[in-house]
Image: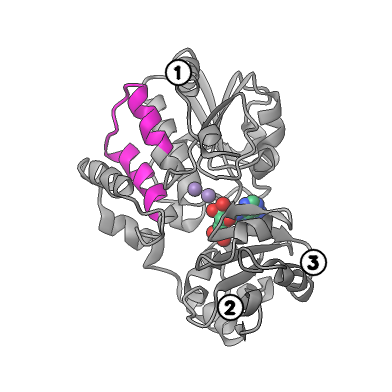
Amino acid sequence: MTTNESAVGEADWRRATELIRASDTLALACHVSPDGDALGSMLGLGLALARTGRKVVASFGDRVFAVPRLLRSLPGQHLLVEPPAYPAEPDLMITFDASTMERLGLLAPHAGKAGELVVIDHHVSNTRFGTVHLVDPAAASTTTVVEELVNRLGLPIDREVATCLYVGLVTDTGSFRHSITTPAAHAMAGRLLATGLRPEEIARELWDRSPFAYLRVLGTALGRATLEPGAAGGLGLVWTYVSRADRAAEGLPYDEVEGMIDVVRRVDEAEVAVVLKEDDEGGWNVSTRSKGAVDVARACAALGGGGHPRAAGFSSALSVADTMAALRPLLAPEGSPS
Ligand code: AMP
Ligand code: MN
Ligand code: MN
Protein backbone atom coordinates (compact mmCIF):
# COMPACT_ATOMS: atom_id res chain seq x y z
CA MET A 1 0.00 0.00 0.00
CA THR A 2 1.41 3.42 -0.90
CA THR A 3 0.77 6.40 1.35
CA ASN A 4 -1.29 8.03 -1.42
CA GLU A 5 -3.79 5.21 -1.36
CA SER A 6 -4.34 5.51 2.36
CA ALA A 7 -4.60 9.31 2.68
CA VAL A 8 -8.16 10.63 2.88
CA GLY A 9 -9.33 11.69 -0.57
CA GLU A 10 -11.64 14.63 -1.26
CA ALA A 11 -14.25 12.25 -2.65
CA ASP A 12 -14.38 10.38 0.66
CA TRP A 13 -14.67 13.61 2.66
CA ARG A 14 -17.50 14.76 0.39
CA ARG A 15 -19.33 11.43 0.55
CA ALA A 16 -18.98 11.21 4.36
CA THR A 17 -20.31 14.74 4.95
CA GLU A 18 -23.18 14.19 2.48
CA LEU A 19 -24.20 10.94 4.14
CA ILE A 20 -24.06 12.42 7.64
CA ARG A 21 -25.95 15.60 6.66
CA ALA A 22 -28.71 13.50 5.10
CA SER A 23 -29.16 11.24 8.17
CA ASP A 24 -31.52 11.85 11.09
CA THR A 25 -30.35 8.73 12.88
CA LEU A 26 -26.74 7.62 13.26
CA ALA A 27 -25.21 4.49 14.78
CA LEU A 28 -21.64 4.89 16.07
CA ALA A 29 -19.28 2.10 17.15
CA CYS A 30 -15.67 2.01 18.35
CA HIS A 31 -13.31 -0.91 18.91
CA VAL A 32 -13.74 -3.36 21.78
CA SER A 33 -12.06 -2.61 25.13
CA PRO A 34 -12.16 1.06 24.15
CA ASP A 35 -9.19 3.30 24.90
CA GLY A 36 -9.23 7.10 25.08
CA ASP A 37 -8.98 7.50 21.32
CA ALA A 38 -11.74 5.00 20.52
CA LEU A 39 -14.24 6.40 23.02
CA GLY A 40 -13.10 10.02 22.62
CA SER A 41 -13.49 10.02 18.83
CA MET A 42 -16.88 8.31 18.99
CA LEU A 43 -18.36 10.48 21.77
CA GLY A 44 -16.82 13.67 20.34
CA LEU A 45 -18.53 13.22 16.97
CA GLY A 46 -21.63 11.82 18.69
CA LEU A 47 -22.02 14.93 20.88
CA ALA A 48 -21.44 17.30 17.96
CA LEU A 49 -24.13 15.49 15.95
CA ALA A 50 -26.59 15.07 18.85
CA ARG A 51 -26.54 18.85 19.32
CA THR A 52 -28.01 19.26 15.81
CA GLY A 53 -31.09 17.31 16.98
CA ARG A 54 -30.07 14.05 15.32
CA LYS A 55 -30.69 10.75 17.08
CA VAL A 56 -27.31 9.24 17.93
CA VAL A 57 -26.56 5.87 19.49
CA ALA A 58 -23.00 4.87 20.35
CA SER A 59 -21.62 1.56 21.54
CA PHE A 60 -18.79 -0.98 21.52
CA GLY A 61 -19.08 -4.74 21.17
CA ASP A 62 -17.67 -6.12 24.41
CA ARG A 63 -19.43 -9.13 25.89
CA VAL A 64 -19.27 -7.45 29.28
CA PHE A 65 -20.21 -3.85 28.56
CA ALA A 66 -18.42 -1.39 30.83
CA VAL A 67 -16.71 1.94 30.26
CA PRO A 68 -13.19 1.75 31.75
CA ARG A 69 -12.94 3.74 34.99
CA LEU A 70 -10.36 6.08 33.41
CA LEU A 71 -12.84 7.17 30.76
CA ARG A 72 -16.00 7.50 32.84
CA SER A 73 -15.64 11.27 33.15
CA LEU A 74 -15.72 11.73 29.35
CA PRO A 75 -18.70 13.84 28.23
CA GLY A 76 -21.38 12.17 26.10
CA GLN A 77 -21.86 8.92 28.08
CA HIS A 78 -25.64 9.37 27.75
CA LEU A 79 -25.27 8.44 24.07
CA LEU A 80 -24.06 4.92 24.98
CA VAL A 81 -26.30 1.88 24.51
CA GLU A 82 -25.41 -1.76 25.19
CA PRO A 83 -24.97 -4.02 22.13
CA PRO A 84 -28.41 -5.74 22.48
CA ALA A 85 -30.07 -2.30 22.07
CA TYR A 86 -27.98 -1.42 18.98
CA PRO A 87 -29.79 -1.20 15.61
CA ALA A 88 -29.42 -4.50 13.74
CA GLU A 89 -29.28 -2.94 10.26
CA PRO A 90 -28.38 0.75 10.63
CA ASP A 91 -28.86 2.93 7.52
CA LEU A 92 -25.66 4.78 8.40
CA MET A 93 -23.04 3.37 10.74
CA ILE A 94 -19.72 5.03 11.60
CA THR A 95 -16.76 3.18 13.16
CA PHE A 96 -13.91 4.70 15.19
CA ASP A 97 -10.29 3.63 15.73
CA ALA A 98 -11.05 0.07 14.53
CA SER A 99 -8.56 -1.24 11.96
CA THR A 100 -10.66 -4.28 11.03
CA MET A 101 -14.31 -5.34 11.16
CA GLU A 102 -13.37 -7.95 13.82
CA ARG A 103 -12.22 -5.18 16.19
CA LEU A 104 -15.92 -4.24 16.50
CA GLY A 105 -16.56 -7.48 18.40
CA LEU A 106 -20.28 -8.09 18.90
CA LEU A 107 -21.10 -5.12 16.63
CA ALA A 108 -19.27 -6.53 13.58
CA PRO A 109 -22.47 -8.16 12.20
CA HIS A 110 -24.26 -4.79 12.50
CA ALA A 111 -21.49 -3.17 10.45
CA GLY A 112 -21.81 -5.93 7.88
CA LYS A 113 -25.52 -5.13 7.46
CA ALA A 114 -25.27 -1.32 7.52
CA GLY A 115 -26.57 0.51 4.45
CA GLU A 116 -23.50 2.75 4.46
CA LEU A 117 -20.43 2.22 6.64
CA VAL A 118 -18.10 5.18 7.26
CA VAL A 119 -14.75 4.00 8.67
CA ILE A 120 -12.80 6.64 10.62
CA ASP A 121 -9.32 5.55 11.69
CA HIS A 122 -5.57 6.18 11.67
CA HIS A 123 -4.09 2.66 11.66
CA VAL A 124 -1.80 2.04 8.69
CA SER A 125 -3.09 -1.54 8.79
CA ASN A 126 -6.74 -0.49 8.29
CA THR A 127 -8.39 -3.03 5.97
CA ARG A 128 -10.87 -0.49 4.51
CA PHE A 129 -13.88 -2.59 5.41
CA GLY A 130 -16.51 0.14 4.90
CA THR A 131 -18.16 1.97 2.03
CA VAL A 132 -16.46 5.32 2.82
CA HIS A 133 -13.01 5.63 4.41
CA LEU A 134 -11.65 8.52 6.45
CA VAL A 135 -8.38 6.76 7.26
CA ASP A 136 -5.26 8.86 7.77
CA PRO A 137 -2.18 6.98 9.01
CA ALA A 138 -0.37 10.32 9.41
CA ALA A 139 -2.94 11.46 11.99
CA ALA A 140 -1.77 11.26 15.61
CA SER A 141 -5.18 9.96 16.70
CA THR A 142 -8.58 9.08 15.31
CA THR A 143 -9.83 12.20 17.12
CA THR A 144 -7.58 14.21 14.75
CA VAL A 145 -9.61 12.91 11.79
CA VAL A 146 -12.85 13.58 13.70
CA GLU A 147 -11.83 17.20 14.34
CA GLU A 148 -11.52 17.77 10.60
CA LEU A 149 -14.83 16.02 9.94
CA VAL A 150 -16.66 18.17 12.51
CA ASN A 151 -15.14 21.27 10.92
CA ARG A 152 -16.13 20.14 7.43
CA LEU A 153 -19.68 19.57 8.71
CA GLY A 154 -19.66 23.17 9.92
CA LEU A 155 -20.46 22.11 13.50
CA PRO A 156 -19.07 23.90 16.56
CA ILE A 157 -16.43 22.30 18.80
CA ASP A 158 -17.45 23.35 22.30
CA ARG A 159 -15.63 22.45 25.51
CA GLU A 160 -17.31 19.05 25.87
CA VAL A 161 -16.63 17.96 22.28
CA ALA A 162 -13.07 19.32 22.65
CA THR A 163 -12.56 17.30 25.85
CA CYS A 164 -13.44 14.08 23.99
CA LEU A 165 -11.10 14.92 21.11
CA TYR A 166 -8.30 15.96 23.48
CA VAL A 167 -8.49 12.68 25.42
CA GLY A 168 -7.88 10.75 22.18
CA LEU A 169 -4.98 13.02 21.26
CA VAL A 170 -3.19 12.84 24.61
CA THR A 171 -3.66 9.09 25.03
CA ASP A 172 -2.46 8.13 21.54
CA THR A 173 0.53 10.51 21.62
CA GLY A 174 1.45 9.31 25.14
CA SER A 175 1.06 12.89 26.39
CA PHE A 176 3.00 14.23 23.40
CA ARG A 177 5.93 11.89 23.96
CA HIS A 178 5.60 9.45 21.03
CA SER A 179 7.13 9.99 17.59
CA ILE A 180 3.71 10.89 16.18
CA THR A 181 3.92 14.16 18.16
CA THR A 182 4.03 16.55 15.18
CA PRO A 183 3.55 20.32 15.06
CA ALA A 184 0.02 19.50 13.85
CA ALA A 185 -0.65 17.49 17.03
CA HIS A 186 0.39 20.42 19.24
CA ALA A 187 -1.55 22.86 17.07
CA MET A 188 -4.66 20.71 17.54
CA ALA A 189 -4.09 20.65 21.31
CA GLY A 190 -3.86 24.45 21.24
CA ARG A 191 -7.19 24.77 19.44
CA LEU A 192 -8.89 22.37 21.87
CA LEU A 193 -7.39 24.04 24.97
CA ALA A 194 -8.75 27.37 23.73
CA THR A 195 -12.29 26.04 24.40
CA GLY A 196 -11.53 26.11 28.13
CA LEU A 197 -11.08 22.40 28.80
CA ARG A 198 -9.14 21.41 31.92
CA PRO A 199 -5.95 19.50 30.99
CA GLU A 200 -4.94 18.93 34.62
CA GLU A 201 -8.27 17.28 35.46
CA ILE A 202 -8.11 15.12 32.35
CA ALA A 203 -4.54 14.03 33.06
CA ARG A 204 -5.39 13.15 36.65
CA GLU A 205 -8.34 10.98 35.59
CA LEU A 206 -6.31 9.25 32.87
CA TRP A 207 -2.98 8.58 34.55
CA ASP A 208 -2.51 9.98 38.03
CA ARG A 209 -4.91 8.02 40.21
CA SER A 210 -5.71 4.41 41.07
CA PRO A 211 -7.07 2.37 43.96
CA PHE A 212 -4.53 1.13 46.52
CA ALA A 213 -5.14 -2.41 45.23
CA TYR A 214 -3.38 -1.41 42.01
CA LEU A 215 -0.11 -0.84 43.86
CA ARG A 216 -0.34 -4.34 45.33
CA VAL A 217 -1.07 -6.00 41.97
CA LEU A 218 1.59 -3.89 40.24
CA GLY A 219 4.06 -5.06 42.88
CA THR A 220 3.20 -8.69 42.19
CA ALA A 221 3.54 -8.25 38.42
CA LEU A 222 6.79 -6.26 38.62
CA GLY A 223 8.20 -8.79 41.08
CA ARG A 224 8.03 -11.47 38.41
CA ALA A 225 9.17 -9.31 35.46
CA THR A 226 11.70 -11.15 33.31
CA LEU A 227 14.53 -9.63 31.29
CA GLU A 228 15.74 -11.66 28.30
CA PRO A 229 18.80 -9.86 26.90
CA GLY A 230 19.19 -12.30 24.00
CA ALA A 231 15.61 -11.96 22.74
CA ALA A 232 14.40 -9.53 20.04
CA GLY A 233 17.49 -10.24 17.95
CA GLY A 234 19.77 -9.49 20.93
CA LEU A 235 18.17 -6.09 21.62
CA GLY A 236 16.40 -7.40 24.70
CA LEU A 237 12.89 -8.26 25.86
CA VAL A 238 11.25 -7.46 29.18
CA TRP A 239 7.94 -9.07 30.02
CA THR A 240 5.55 -9.94 32.79
CA TYR A 241 1.95 -10.98 33.31
CA VAL A 242 -0.97 -10.19 35.58
CA SER A 243 -3.49 -12.98 36.14
CA ARG A 244 -7.11 -12.79 37.22
CA ALA A 245 -6.05 -14.55 40.44
CA ASP A 246 -3.60 -11.68 41.12
CA ARG A 247 -6.45 -9.22 40.70
CA ALA A 248 -8.98 -11.28 42.64
CA ALA A 249 -6.61 -11.41 45.62
CA GLU A 250 -6.82 -7.61 45.85
CA GLY A 251 -10.31 -7.06 44.43
CA LEU A 252 -8.97 -5.14 41.42
CA PRO A 253 -11.09 -4.86 38.23
CA TYR A 254 -9.50 -5.71 34.88
CA ASP A 255 -9.57 -2.20 33.43
CA GLU A 256 -7.22 -0.97 36.18
CA VAL A 257 -4.34 -3.04 34.77
CA GLU A 258 -4.81 -1.99 31.11
CA GLY A 259 -2.00 0.61 31.33
CA MET A 260 0.59 -1.49 33.17
CA ILE A 261 2.72 -1.69 30.01
CA ASP A 262 3.61 1.99 30.55
CA VAL A 263 5.62 1.03 33.62
CA VAL A 264 7.29 -2.01 32.05
CA ARG A 265 8.26 -0.37 28.75
CA ARG A 266 10.68 2.04 30.44
CA VAL A 267 13.38 -0.63 30.90
CA ASP A 268 16.66 0.50 29.27
CA GLU A 269 17.93 -3.03 28.61
CA ALA A 270 14.98 -4.04 26.42
CA GLU A 271 13.90 -3.00 22.93
CA VAL A 272 10.54 -4.75 23.39
CA ALA A 273 8.21 -4.81 26.40
CA VAL A 274 5.27 -7.17 26.83
CA VAL A 275 2.53 -7.42 29.46
CA LEU A 276 0.00 -10.26 29.35
CA LYS A 277 -3.26 -9.39 31.11
CA GLU A 278 -5.83 -12.07 31.97
CA ASP A 279 -9.43 -10.89 31.78
CA ASP A 280 -12.32 -12.12 33.92
CA GLU A 281 -13.18 -14.86 31.41
CA GLY A 282 -9.66 -16.32 31.44
CA GLY A 283 -8.52 -14.96 28.06
CA TRP A 284 -5.25 -13.05 27.77
CA ASN A 285 -4.88 -9.59 26.23
CA VAL A 286 -1.28 -8.94 25.32
CA SER A 287 0.23 -5.42 25.17
CA THR A 288 3.47 -5.00 23.25
CA ARG A 289 5.69 -1.93 22.86
CA SER A 290 8.94 -1.34 21.00
CA LYS A 291 11.42 1.51 20.88
CA GLY A 292 11.53 1.54 17.08
CA ALA A 293 13.76 -1.28 15.83
CA VAL A 294 11.10 -4.00 16.05
CA ASP A 295 7.74 -3.70 14.29
CA VAL A 296 5.43 -5.07 16.99
CA ALA A 297 2.34 -4.46 14.82
CA ARG A 298 3.65 -7.06 12.39
CA ALA A 299 4.41 -9.52 15.18
CA CYS A 300 0.96 -9.07 16.71
CA ALA A 301 -0.76 -9.28 13.32
CA ALA A 302 0.86 -12.68 12.82
CA LEU A 303 -0.91 -13.78 16.02
CA GLY A 304 -4.30 -12.39 15.02
CA GLY A 305 -3.95 -8.89 16.51
CA GLY A 306 -2.55 -5.62 15.20
CA GLY A 307 -1.83 -2.01 16.06
CA HIS A 308 0.93 0.49 15.39
CA PRO A 309 4.63 -0.30 14.72
CA ARG A 310 5.63 0.69 18.28
CA ALA A 311 2.40 -0.16 20.15
CA ALA A 312 0.36 -3.23 19.32
CA GLY A 313 -1.57 -6.08 20.87
CA PHE A 314 -3.33 -9.38 20.41
CA SER A 315 -5.59 -11.80 22.28
CA SER A 316 -4.48 -15.28 23.28
CA ALA A 317 -6.31 -18.34 24.56
CA LEU A 318 -3.00 -20.12 25.27
CA SER A 319 -1.08 -20.24 28.55
CA VAL A 320 1.41 -17.51 29.42
CA ALA A 321 4.37 -19.73 28.50
CA ASP A 322 2.85 -20.85 25.20
CA THR A 323 1.84 -17.29 24.28
CA MET A 324 5.38 -16.05 24.90
CA ALA A 325 6.79 -19.01 22.95
CA ALA A 326 4.65 -18.00 19.97
CA LEU A 327 5.53 -14.30 20.25
CA ARG A 328 9.27 -14.45 20.97
CA PRO A 329 10.47 -15.60 17.50
CA LEU A 330 8.36 -12.87 15.85
CA LEU A 331 10.25 -10.06 17.59
CA ALA A 332 13.16 -9.84 15.14
CA PRO A 333 14.40 -6.32 14.35
CA GLU A 334 13.55 -4.85 10.91
CA GLY A 335 15.73 -6.14 8.13
CA SER A 336 17.19 -9.06 10.10
CA PRO A 337 16.41 -12.67 9.25
CA SER A 338 13.84 -14.02 11.71
P1 AMP B 1 -2.85 -1.80 24.16
O1 AMP B 1 -1.58 -2.52 24.47
O2 AMP B 1 -4.06 -2.54 24.60
O3 AMP B 1 -2.80 -0.38 24.64
O4 AMP B 1 -2.94 -1.75 22.57
C1 AMP B 1 -2.01 -1.04 21.80
C2 AMP B 1 -2.52 -0.92 20.38
O5 AMP B 1 -2.57 -2.21 19.79
C3 AMP B 1 -3.95 -0.40 20.27
O6 AMP B 1 -3.96 0.98 20.06
C4 AMP B 1 -4.49 -1.11 19.06
O7 AMP B 1 -4.14 -0.38 17.92
C5 AMP B 1 -3.73 -2.41 19.01
N1 AMP B 1 -4.40 -3.62 19.52
C6 AMP B 1 -4.46 -4.06 20.81
N2 AMP B 1 -5.08 -5.25 20.90
C7 AMP B 1 -5.44 -5.59 19.64
C8 AMP B 1 -6.12 -6.71 19.07
N3 AMP B 1 -6.56 -7.75 19.81
N4 AMP B 1 -6.31 -6.71 17.72
C9 AMP B 1 -5.85 -5.69 16.95
N5 AMP B 1 -5.21 -4.62 17.43
C10 AMP B 1 -4.99 -4.55 18.75
MN1 MN C 1 -7.42 2.46 20.10
MN1 MN D 1 -6.02 5.45 17.98
Distance from Cα at disc 2 to Cα at disc 3: 26 Å
Looking at the rendered structure, which numbered label has been put on residue 318?
3
**Colour convention of the picture:** one colour
Q: Is residue 171 left or right of residue 291?
A: left
Give the mark, 2 or 1, whose residue is nearer the N terminus.
1
**Badge 2: residue crowd in 10 Å (few <14, some 14–19, many ≥20):** some
- Name the amino acid type tagged 2: Leu
Q: Residue at 49% across / 21% down in the picture?
A: 16
Secondary structure under the numbered disc 3 in the rendered image: loop
Asked whether 154 falls inside the magenta stretch, the response is yes
Q: Amino acid at mark 3?
A: Leu
Number of marks in picture: 3
Mark 2–mark 1 distance (CA, rounded to whole Å): 46 Å
Q: Nearer the viewer, mark 2 or mark 3?
A: 2
Does residue 213 appear in this view?
yes
Quarter location, residue 285: bottom right
From the image, tell me which residue sits under label 1.
14
Residue 205 percent across, percent down from the top left: 37, 59
The answer to whether 331 appears left or right of 55 in the picture is right
Q: Quadrant of residue 30?
A: top right
Asked if marks 2 and 1 touch (Cβ < 8 Å), the reply is no
- 148 versus 269 height, above or below: above
- As shown in the figure, which amino acid type bears the numbered disc 1? Arg
Say what secondary structure mark 2 lies in: loop
Say whether marks 1 and 3 touch (CB < 8 Å). Answer: no
* Location of mark 2 (residue): 235
Residue range in magenta is 145-170
Q: Measured from the top left, where is residue 247 in percent x and y?
A: 61, 73
Sequence-wise, which precedes: disc 1 or disc 3?
1
